[in-house]
Image (spheres, grey):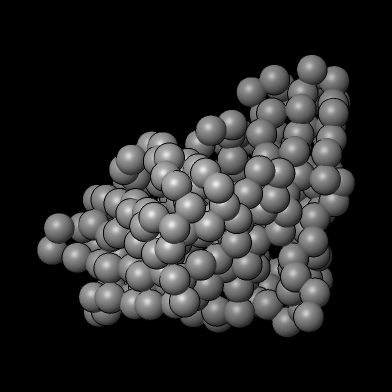
Amino acid sequence: SQQGEEDPQALSIQEGENATMNCSYKTSINNLQWYRQNSGRGLVHLILIRSNEREKHSGRLRVTLDTSKKSSSLLITASRAADTASYFCATAFAGGTSYGKLTFGQGTILTVHP
Amino acid sequence: GAGVSQSPRYKVAKRGQDVALRCDPISGHVSLFWYQQALGQGPEFLTYFQNEAQLDKSGLPSDRFFAERPEGSVSTLKIQRTQQEDSAVYLCASSSSRTGGGETQYFGPGTRLLVL
């Protein structure tokens, strides 16, 4: 079963605009990761944020994590047509014998129009 | 360096047929995961190996699913007597983490299985 929910399910913007995607989850986590998936390709890792971090940047990506609200957001600034893809958040559970297995949301489909 | 590779990329099977899906992880990666991704959904965990030991197979949907990693490198996911509901993309991921601390997982391109 899916761990959390992503919002929105689909997002359509113009090139140059910013895109924000949100993710909520249910249990305590070790870290949260964001992945991108293009049509017909595998998942590409974008960024990992640990449970003791609140914000992280990587190029045009900015991720925030609020463990009190069990939520995260991914901001893509100055979007490009090449950013068109599905974006997934994935959580790694804390404790037990989780072995770092990831639980994914259902994803946000981002379309960036040239 | 080389990433995670999977073969075949596409597989069409008749219902009842057995299939075997291969995963070559990144060299030296201790941890190997299999996930199943249904159309329009996020991936779901199937099983986890640390070296050759299968430490978690809680996500395998039935006893028709079997995975192995005999030498701690290449892994094979086998599905016996395939059913139409097995149609999905099967993703393999590897990680250098030895402690299961949830480090970055690197995914292969997946095998798209269609059961007719």
Is A106 displayed left or right of A39 in the figure?
left
State the image coordinates of residue B62 (x, y, percent, origin top left).
60, 33
Q: Quadrant of the C terminus of chain B?
A: top right
| Relative to A52, residue B5 above or below | above
Image quadrant containing the N terminus of chain B: bottom right
Q: Which of A25 and A64 is in front in this view?
A: A64
Q: How far from the left and from the top, in percent, is residue A111?
A: 50, 43
In the figure, residue B30 lies in which quadrant?
bottom right
Residue A57 left/right relative to B49: left
- Residue A68 pos. (x, y %): 13, 63
Residue A62 appears in view: yes
Which residue ends up furthest to the left in the rendered image? A68
> Would residue A96 be visible to someone looking at this image?
no
Which residue is rendered at x = 19% and y = 65% of the image? A66
The percent coordinates of residue B53 (x first, y second) are: 65, 67
Image: B91 above or below B25: above
